[in-house]
Image: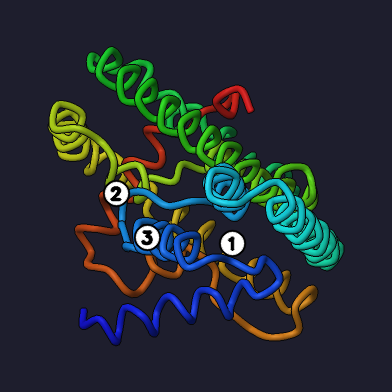
């Protein structure tokens, strides 16, 4: 950076913070701080609240008492405006809560019961000589569910604090579906090598048994697809495919068989305690 460019940047900092009437030395410190704060990282980043806290702690060291009082008040005003915007955004999600509540109700009352009526279909895993392997896989899936829920909660409160309760309810309702009907595709992307090996073994062991129920399972998933479309149209006014359309019609026969097999193996009458 040339001396001219550096001077231009310092003047820019002073102009941007004109209300603080920064000295040249103070503007230099602010410029250095902005350079440290700005580099992009895929792993680490501030929430809006954390960025404000970081700025307050830094500017308190740079500014004198009168300047910091102005800066602190400006930050307080920005925080209040941001809180209001979060609350306003959250009021728009009431319809989304109803939409997801109706989805959960369909799963619980219409989609899932038929899977538990056939004793052979639901209990074949528990009666198998490989029950211990299936129990292990279900325990790993339960960990996946619990970790996902903790991620939802921590990220929500990190970014929204208590200002968007409706958004949190929507996120938890969506997550509840993974307790009712296994989200095998997401689970598969996160498992370690030993669990992946267990999954491969069980997939091969039981895929031909599940073939006897292919027509039934496919029919239920098609019914879910129809419901998802109708429910979306009801609340949002336009058609869109459900999440499971990725499974039906857009994957290979082997992938569809794997999906059906593993979802049935992971299915839990107690809904994993949700």
Examine the rendering and report whether any part of residue 174 can be seen. Answer: no
Foreground: 2 or 243?
2
Name the image quarter holding residue 232: bottom right
Residue 58 as seen in the image, left or right of residue 7 = right
Report the coloring of the rendering.
Answer: rainbow
Rendered location of residue 182, percent (x, y): 46, 41
Which circle, 3 or 2, is nearer the viewer? 3
Q: Quadrant of the C terminus?
A: top right
Is 49 or 74 nearer to us in this picture? 74
* Residue 105 coordinates in the image, percent (x, y): 75, 48
Res 224 label: 1
- Reading the image, the residue beneath label 3 is 32
Please give the name of the residue rendered at 53% of the width and 50% of the height, measured from the top-left corner: 62
Q: Are marks 2 and 1 in contact (CB under 8 Å)?
A: no
Label 1 to label 3: alpha-carbon separation: 56 Å
Q: Is residue 100 left or right of residue 121?
A: right
Q: Tags 3 and 2 in contact by the CB under 8 Å rule?
A: no
Mark 3 residue crowding within 10 angstroms, few (<14) / some (14–19) / many (20+) = few
Looking at the rendered image, the disc whose residue lies closer to the viewer, 1 or 3, is 3
24 left or right of 56 in image: left
Question: Residue 211: which disc?
Answer: 2
């Amino acid at each position: 950076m040339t001396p001219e460019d550096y001077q231009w940047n310092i003047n820019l900092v002073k102009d941007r913070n004109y209300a603080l009437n920064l000295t040249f030395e103070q503007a230099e410190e602010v410029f250095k701080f902005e350079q440290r704060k700005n580099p992009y990282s895929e792993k680490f980043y501030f929430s809006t609240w954390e960025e404000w806290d970081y700025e307050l702690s830094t500017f308190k060291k740079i500014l004198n008492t009168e300047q910091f009082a102005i800066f602190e008040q400006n930050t307080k005003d920005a925080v209040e405006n941001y809180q209001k915007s979060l609350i306003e955004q959250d009021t728009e999600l009431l319809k989304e809560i109803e939409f997801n509540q109706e989805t959960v109700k369909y799963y619980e009352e219409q989609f899932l019961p038929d899977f538990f009526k056939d004793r052979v279909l639901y209990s074949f895993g528990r009666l198998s000589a490989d029950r211990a392997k299936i129990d292990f896989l279900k325990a790993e899936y339960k960990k996946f569910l619990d970790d996902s829920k903790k991620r939802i909660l921590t990220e929500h409160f990190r970014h929204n604090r208590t200002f968007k309760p409706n958004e949190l309810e929507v996120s938890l309702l969506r997550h509840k579906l993974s307790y009712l009907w296994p989200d095998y595709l997401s689970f598969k992307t996160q498992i370690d090598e030993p669990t992946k090996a267990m999954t491969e073994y069980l997939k091969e062991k039981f895929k031909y048994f599940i073939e006897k129920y292919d027509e039934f399972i496919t029919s239920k998933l098609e019914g879910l697809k129809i419901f998802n479309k109708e429910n979306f149209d009801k609340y949002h006014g336009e058609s869109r495919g459900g999440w499971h359309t990725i499974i039906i019609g857009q994957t290979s026969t082997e992938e569809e068989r794997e999906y059906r097999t593993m979802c049935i193996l992971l299915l839990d009458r107690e809904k994993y305690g949700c």
